[in-house]
Amino acid sequence: MALRFFNTYSREIEEFEPRDPTARSIRMYTCGPTVYSRAHIGNFRAYIFEDLLQRHLELRGYKVHRVMNITDVEDKTIRGAREAGIPLQKFTEQFKDAFFEDAHMLRIKRADDYPAATDQRYIARMIEMISALISKGLAYQADDKSVYFRINKFPDYGKLAHFDLTQLQSTGRVKHDEYDKEHIGDFALWKAWDEADGDVKWDSPWGPGRPGWHIECSAMSMALLGDQIDIHCGGVDNIFPHHEAEIAQSEGVTGKKFVRYWLHCAHLLVDGQKMAKSLGNFYTVPDVLAKSYTGRELRYALLRVHYRVPLNFTWEGMNEARESLARIDDWLARLRQIAKSGNVQRSTANAQRPTTAFEDALDDDLNISAALGFLFESIRETNRAMDQNKMDAAPASEWLDWWKRINTVLDLEAEADVVVPHEVAQLAEERENARREKNWKRSDELRDRISALGWEVRDTKDGPKLTRGAGSA
Ligand SMILES: [Zn+2]
C-alpha cells in the first residue's frame, strides 16, 4: 500500500508523492519551540508525532532531511529576558538546553539542523526576503516604521486555514498600535525597534528592528531546504496565522509552491481540559518524571493516539502506558529465551508468523492505534503459543527480528543498562525467600519497601522481575 497522509491544505487524504520520487529523499520542516519557558507535554506530543512520521518514512526507505527551528526572538522571549534582567541570549539558552534534554528523555530523533532565528545568516536571509516582497508590492513599510505583508495582494491567503478574510475584517479588533496597517490581517515581517526591545535589534533597510515570527520560518526553511519542500508539520494552532503567513511569504518571493503536504497534530488535553497554568494541570517533562515515570513511558503515552485525534493525558493513562510496556518487555524476554534455546523439537507448523500489518497501518496516515493494536494482538497470540509449548526457536527469532524492525519506529525498548540498586535487589531477594517460606505478610512488607524506593516487583513465570515503579508518588 502506498503512503497516504491527510493534507491540511486540501483537507483530504492524499497519496504521498515526494517532489523527487527517484532520489527517495524528503525535505521536512517542523516548527520548533519558542524558548521563553520550558516546553510542556502538549508541545512534545507534536514533536513525538513528527518523530514518528520521520521514523516511518525512514522505515519505508526514504532519507529524511529534517529541519526544526528554534524561535529565540519574538515578543515572549524579549519580555522574559527583560523581566529576568539578563541578555536575550542568556535567557533563551537555558530553555534551549531544557528542550534538548527533554527531547532526549523522550527518545526523539535529532533533526539534521536546528537553526536559531537570531543567527546572523538567517537574519540576512529574512531581510533579503522582505526586500523582495516589498519590490513585488506584497509588502510595505507603514508609518510606524514596521514592514507588513499586504494580504490583499496575495489571493491564496487563507487557503490553508480555509479562512474567510472578510470575517477577519469584521471581527478583528484594531489595537492602537496597528492603526498604521492597511488591512487588519496584514502581519508584521519586520518590527521596528521600540524601547521595550532594549538592545535586541538588528540593522535593516527600514531602520533598526527585529524580524516577525513568521518570516523566521520561511527564511530558515528556504536557507536549509530550498524553495520547495515535501512536508511541513506543526500543531493545529500553527495553521493560522503562522503557516498561512509562511506560504504567503515563501510563495510571494519564489512564485513556486512552497509545501506539498501540510500535516498538523491535534491538541493535548489534561484530564479532559485544556492545559493551563491557572488550572494546575500544566505539565512539563520533568513534572512527569518527578512522579517516577520514565521518559519511555511518557513517550508511549504521547505516541499511542492517532495524531489527528485530541489526546487526553491522565495519570491513569501513564499507568496504562507502564503496563503496556511491561507486556512488551515480558514478551521480548520470553521470545529471547526460546530463540536462545535453539529448540526445534516442538510442533510449530501453525505458529503465527509476523506480517506487514504494523507498517501497513502506519502507511495509512500514521494510524498508530491500529499498528499498536496489531502489536498487542500478536503478543497475545504468540504468548498463547508459548504457553502451549507451540513456539520454537525459528518463529521466536522471526518475531524478534520483526520487533527490531518496528522498534526503529517505536523506539520503546527498555534500556538494557537499567541498573537495579543493590539495596533494592537485596530486598527483592529477601522477599523471594519470604515467599518460598509462604510468609505472605513479610513478603508484602518487603514489596512495600521496594515500592517506596521507586521500584516495582512483579512475579512472572520466570521469577520476580524488578522494574522502575511509581514509588510512593
Ligand atoms: Zn514555524
Image: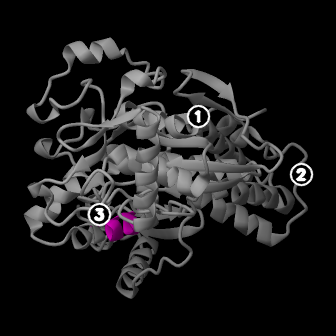
- Left or right, residue 86 beside residue 320: left
Q: Are marks 2 and 3 in contact (CB under 8 Å)?
A: no
Query: Disc 2 vs disc 3: which is toward the camera?
Result: 3
| Mark nearer the N terminus (3 vs 1) | 1
Cα distance between the residues tagged 2 and 1: 65 Å
- Tell me which amino acid carries mark 3: Pro
The residue positioned 22% from the left and 12% from the top of the image is: 170
Instruction: Give the residue type at disc 1.
Output: Gly
Highlighted magenta segment, given as a residue range: 95-102
Is the CB of the residue bearing disc 3 within 8 angstroms of ligand 1? no
Please say whether residue 107 is visible from this viewpoint. Answer: yes
> Which is more toward the observer, 2 or 229?
229
How crowded is the residue under tag 2: few (<14 C-alpha within 10 Å), some, or many (20+)?
Answer: few
Report the residue marked by disc 1: 255
Q: Is residue 374 left or right of residue 197?
A: right
Q: Secondary structure at mark 1?
A: loop
Residue 461 drawn above or below residue 11:
below
Of circles 2 and 1, the one toward us is 1
**Splitting the image into 4 quarters, where does residue 433 fall?**
bottom left
Circle 3: is it few (<14), some (14-19), or many (20+) Cα within 10 Å?
A: some
Mark number, residue 286: 3
- Within 10 angstroms of label 1, few (less than 14), some, or many (20 or more) residues? few
Q: Which mark is residue 347?
A: 2
Q: How far across and down, in percent of the image, does residue 283 sit?
A: 25, 52
- Magenta segment main secondary structure: helix
Q: Residue at x 14, y 72 (%)?
A: 86
The quadrant holding residue 234 is top left
- Residue 19 place in picture, x, y as percent: 72, 40
Q: Looking at the picture, which amino acid does disc 2 mark?
A: Ser
Question: Is the CB of mark 1 within 8 Å of ligand 1?
Answer: no
CA gap, disc 3 and disc 1: 44 Å
